[in-house]
Amino acid sequence: MDRPTPQLGTQNDTLVPRILAFLVDSLIVGIAATVLVVVVGLVSESLAGVVGGLAGLGALAYFIYLEGTYGQTLGKRVLGIVVVTEDGGDCDLKAAAIRNLLRIVDALPFLYLIGIVLIFVTDDGQRLGDILGNTVVVRTQ
């Protein structure tokens, strides 16, 4: 998977693709975690519980690694969007970690309300994770 070419200046036109990409990614991560827990559960129920608990860390790693390495997760790739720095450079692992760790705050109080409100009120369509990570989400060319 290669980094796509960003279409700079499109960050205010990505809300719906961002939501759909997150749903696609959640489905991918959810299916993978479920299959893994079921398979491990056939061997040991208690171990399956541990694996299920670690699935959240795996999901976080999925987002951080793919965005920090390629600028996009599989969901973002399907929807034609990419994470870049505010100046249009490549998103690195540090920026990806910041923006994804702050998903917890962006998701508050429910359904990503803080993140969505910030996307609407910031000039560059950024949620808190983007602001602190100095990133924007733009369309790909």
Image (cartoon, helix red, strand yellow):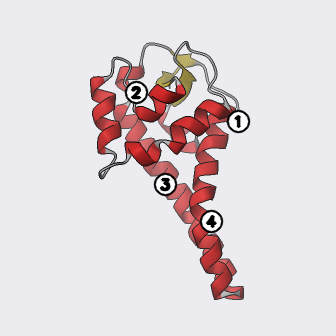
Q: Of discs 2 and 1, which sits in the foreground? A: 2
The disc, 1 or 4, on the residue closer to the chain's N-terminal end is 1
Compared to residue 127, the image places residue 74 above or below, namely below
Any part of residue 26 in sight: yes
Q: How far from the left and from the top, in percent, is residue 19?
A: 38, 42
* Mark carried by residue 54: 4
Q: CA distance from mark 4 to mark 2?
A: 29 Å
Foreground of the two, 69 or 106:
106
**Residue at mark 3 to residue at mark 4: CA–CA distance:** 15 Å
Q: Nearer the viewer, mark 1 or mark 3?
A: 3
Distance of mark 2 from mark 3, alpha carbons? Answer: 20 Å
Mark 4 secondary-structure assignment: helix
Badge 3 element: helix
Asked if disc 2 and disc 3 are in contact, CB closer than 8 Å, the reply is: no
Mark whose residue sits in front, 2 or 3 = 2
Marks 2/1: CA–CA distance:
25 Å
Q: Earlier in the sequence, mark 2 or mark 1?
A: 1
Are the residues flagged by discs 1 and 4 in contact, CB closer than 8 Å?
no
Crowding near the residue tagged with mark 4, few <14, some 14–19, many ≥20 C-alpha atoms within 10 Å: few
Which secondary structure, mark 1?
Answer: loop
Q: Which residue is mark 3?
A: 26
Q: Identify the amino acid type marked 4.
A: Leu
Residue denoted by label 1: 1
Q: Nearer the viewer, mark 3 or mark 4?
A: 4
Q: Earlier in the sequence, mark 3 or mark 4?
A: 3
User: First in sequence: mark 4 or mark 2?
Assistant: 4
> Going 31% across and 37% down the picture, which residue do you hit?
116
Label 2 vs 3, first from the N-terminus: 3
Query: In the displayed structure, does residue 54 sit left or right of residue 137?
Result: right
Residue at which label 2 appears: 126
- Image coords of residue 24 (percent x, y): 48, 50
